[in-house]
Amino acid sequence: MADPHTRAPRRWLRLVLVLSLALNLAVLGLAVGAWLRFGPGGHGHGHVESVGAELVRALPRADRRALREAMHGGPEGRRPPAAALADIDAALRARPFDGATLSAMLTAQAAERAAWQDAVQAAWLERVAAMSDTERAAYADRLREAMADRRERHRAPRRESR
């Protein structure tokens, strides 16, 4: 028989433990994010851009403009980010919490992003395929130069030996 003087853990104690865990994870996330952004040497090199950004930036201006128009068009039926965020907010506040619903929302958003990325990639490839050999070689030169500049920007300064 259970001891009548032993009380079940209080609900507030469970809430405090969950909030403590959430705060610890947030601090850990900030620390990892800072390390990824500024590197192990502590030298800030700012925002690290994707290779895709370099691929677009190296295109001729007219091609960049056409690709930008294709990117902003996005997949048909795409919901505005504010609507998706409102749905996530509602799912986070729902009682009882339904993790499966939130997971389905995130999976749907990932699928939308993937479809958008596929459309942009196809538009980029179409632009590159339409280039002449000379234009494509000049594009490759600009891309190589941009990547070399990128490596140089993100290289940590050398420490002087004493």
Image (cartoon, rainbow, N blue to C red):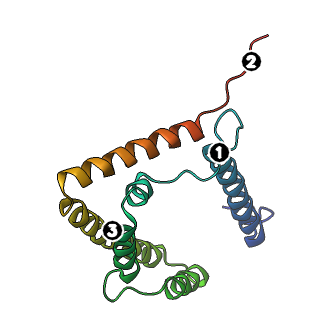
Residues at marks 1 and 3, CA–CA distance in whole angstroms? 28 Å
Question: What residue sits right under mark 1 in the picture?
Answer: 45
Residues at marks 2 and 3, CA–CA distance in whole angstroms? 46 Å
Residue that appears at 68% across and 48% down: 34
| Quarter of the image with the N terminus in it | bottom right
Image location of residue 96, percent across then percent down? 56, 82
Vertical relation: 130 (above or below) 29: below
The kind of secondary structure element at disc 1 is loop
Using the image as rendered, state which of residue 5 and residue 38 is in the foreground. Answer: 38
Crowding near pointer 1: few (<14 within 10 Å), some, many (20+)? Answer: few
Q: Quadrant of residue 147?
A: top left
Residue that appears at 46% across and 53% down: 50
Image location of residue 149, percent across then percent down? 51, 41
Type of amino acid under label 3: Ala
Image location of residue 68, percent across then percent down? 40, 74
Q: Earlier in the sequence, mark 1 or mark 3?
A: 1
Question: What residue sits right under mark 3 in the picture?
Answer: 114
Q: Are marks 1 and 2 in contact (CB under 8 Å)?
A: no
Q: Quadrant of residue 19?
A: bottom right
Crowding near pointer 3: few (<14 within 10 Å), some, many (20+)? Answer: few
